[in-house]
Image (cartoon, rainbow, N blue to C red):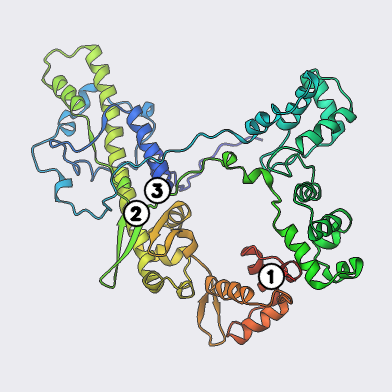
Amino acid sequence: MLKQFLNLKLSQKLSPQQIQLMKLIQLPTQAFEQRLLEEMNENPALEAGKEEDFEADEFANEDYDDYDDAESDRIEADDINIDEYLSDDDTPDYKTQANNYSDDDQERETPFASPVSFHQDLINQLNTFILNDEEREIAEFLVGSIDDMGYIRRSIPDIVDDMAFTQGIYTDEATVEKMLHVIHELEPSGVGARDLQECLLLQLKHRTPTEYVELAIDIIENQFDAFTKKHYDKLLQKYNVSNEQLKKAVHEIERLNPKPGGAFTGNNKVTENVVPDFAIRIVDGELELTLNGRNAPSLHVSKDYQEMMQTYKDSRDKSTAQKDAVQFIKQKLDSAKWFIDAIRQRQETLYVTMNAIMHYQEEYFLDGDETKLKPMILKDIADMVGLDISTISRVANSKYVETPYGTKLIKEFFSEAMKNDQGEDVSTLEIKKILQNTIEEEDKKKPLPDDQLAEILKEKGYPIARRTIAKYREQLDIPVARMRKKM
């Protein structure tokens, strides 16, 4: 049986403007500049630069939380208060504001080189070999199968089938194997290998033959598993050589490049420059915070659009076309005013958040000692500045700060707290740093296992379980003791 009944409930719904503001806050400097350009291209009522007749705070007190989609609440042209969109002659608010931004206002573009690509360089090298048409087609297909690290990760039968189905090249495995040997003659040595063992062998065979190179080849060819597991005692017994001889052979192997393609300068992918969103400097023993000036653009509403509104206001006979035009103008002006206000809110949010982080970690920023980083979670900063934890997270996850000790990702300053033997809260970052230093100072002939590392940190006042040591070691990308062993 169907029944109808009324049910009242309270729910929160973010307006499109609020969602856009959160997205703006999350953007780092370079992405913010791109977003700014997109908005200016889409909205002709928004212009860059300072406009003398535009009052920046004219719309600061308007409430945009109740805005809905443009089509959902159409206001008739006769009901629009034109005066709200026309400026007066008061002094613009930006002229009375202090400049808390850095003077790095220039647009600095980094030129990138356009070198020959890795695969094109290999093709160019093939031109030095005497090959018939079929061989050249197979060789070029093999080059195209090499990944950015320099490996061919496919079997010969798969390559034969692929050439037949996709290129119409019908050949056999023996011919492909022959062309693979040609690829192995290309530079950098080791390119075209099908696995790490073959890659290292190819590089060793390109070396000038010596006693230690020959021993290294034998080890990789016949004792690869023992070598990767660093069973040096087994290798000494197998080859009946001295510790010094084995050490020199291992040194020859350690000099090899396990990723030959990655060493090619033309294969480096263009990476985005890290542009610091903030800068912290020490001036007369005090910390000084500045926001990158590229985050504080000067924007104003187009004077031409304001004049259009004035023309409509002064017009006696308002046609249907004029009323449609003023609807369009109102929409663009509202959007421009909101965007200017959103940028102002973004600037304030970024500045107050980073300022709170700077003062919370003042000891670290004054001398750069990572062991002085205090335990700090998102809630600590959220409580200091009166913002939501999610807002602090958006600022911390994607922003960088330039410090006297390098450019840092802000989220790296956040860490959980642990108790030391004195019952004091210490940052997990401090413990990781001490763990890293302990491992760096260990005897590499007898590296310390996790249980011994736990004992050492306990003696230093940090009672930590062995499994926690293992977790921190993995987070620091440090291998287990056996893999840290050196001769």
Marks 2 & 3, CB-CB < 8 Å contact: yes
The N terminus - image quarter? top right
In the figure, residue 456 lies in which quadrant?
A: bottom right
Q: Is residue 343 above or below residue 161?
A: below
Does 275 appear above or below 232?
A: above
Q: Which of marks 1 and 2 is nearer the N terminus?
A: 2
Residue 476 position (above or below residue 439): above
C-alpha distance separating marks 2 and 3: 8 Å
Label 1's element? helix
Q: Residue 349 carries which label?
A: 2
Which residue in the structure is indicated by mark 3?
Answer: 25
Could you give the CA–CA distance between mark 1 and mark 3, rounded to whole angstroms? 36 Å
Q: Nearer the viewer, residue 343 or 269?
A: 269
**Label 2: element kind:** helix
Type of amino acid at the residue the image marks with label 3: Ile
Q: Where is residue 105 in the image (x, y as percent from the top left)?
A: 28, 46
State which quadrant residue 384 falls in.
Answer: bottom left
Residue visible at 22% across and 15% down in the picture:
322
Q: What residue did someone put label 1 on?
A: 470
Q: Residues within 10 Å of mark 2 (few under 14, many from 20)?
A: some
Q: Which of 344 and 367 is in front in this view?
A: 367
Cα distance between the residues tagged 1 and 2? 38 Å
